[in-house]
Each structure stands twice: as C-alpha cells, then as structure tokens.
Image (cartoon, rainbow, N blue to C red):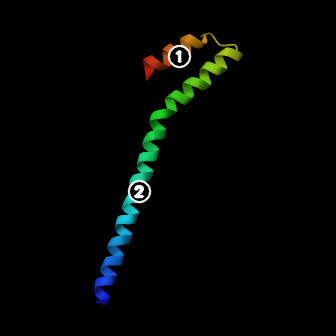
Amino acid sequence: MVRFWQKFSVLLETYYAQMLEFRAEILLWALSGSFPIILLGVWVKAAKSGDFSLSPPEFARYFFAFF
C-alpha cells in the first residue's frame, strides 16, 4: 500500500508540474502576440511628441504592414 501512495505522489507532482509549464507557455504566447501592438502605441506616442520623419498614421501603417 505504501508503494501505491509513492507512485500516486510522483504522478501527482509530475502532472502538476506539467500543468504549470503549460500555463506559463500560454502566458508567454499571449505576451508575444500583444507585444507588437504595445510597441505600436509607444511609437505613435513618440511620433506625436518627437521629431521623427514619419507621422503617427505613417507609423501605424508601417507596423500593420510589418505585423
């Protein structure tokens, strides 16, 4: 009976670690998908206040064409 609980404990720990890895992978996937949109906002804001050769709509067009 003790051997059963040892195996059960190992399986439980293994599946819990796998679940945590999967959730972290989903989080990283979501961040990588939203990162270009965040950068678009940063560059449009910088184009409004800085001295750039491109206007904010041109920055947006560039990012959407690249994305």
**Left or right of 37, for residue 18:** left
Helix, strand or loop at mark 2: helix
**Where is residue 17 shown, x and y percent of the image?**
40, 64
Q: What number of labels is visible?
A: 2
**Where is residue 43 shown, x and y percent of the image?**
60, 22
**Where is residue 12 shown, x and y percent of the image?**
35, 71
The residue sitting at 46% across, 37% down in the picture is 32
The residue sitting at 41% across, 56% down in the picture is 21
Of the residues under marks 2 and 1, which one precedes in the sequence? 2
> Are circles 2 and 1 on residues that touch, CB within 8 Å?
no
Q: Residues within 10 Å of mark 1 (few under 14, many from 20)?
A: some
Which residue has dot 2 on it?
Answer: 21
**Left or right of 27, for residue 51:** right
Mark carried by residue 42: none
| Above or below for 7 versus 48 | below
The type of residue carrying mark 2 is: Glu
**Where is residue 37 shown, x and y percent of the image?**
51, 27
Q: Which quadrant would residue 42 be assigned to in this image?
A: top right
Quadrant including the C terminus: top left
The residue sitting at 32% across, 72% down in the picture is 11
The type of residue carrying mark 1 is: Ala
Q: Residues within 10 Å of mark 2 (few under 14, many from 20)?
A: few
Quadrant including the N terminus: bottom left
Helix, strand or loop at mark 1: helix
Judge by depth and name the residue closer to the eye, 33 or 51.
33
| Residue closest to the far bottom | 1
| Above or below for 58 versus 3 | above
The residue sitting at 32% across, 89% down in the picture is 2
**Left or right of 9, for residue 56:** right
Mark carried by residue 60: 1
What's the CA distance linking mark 2 and mark 1?
35 Å
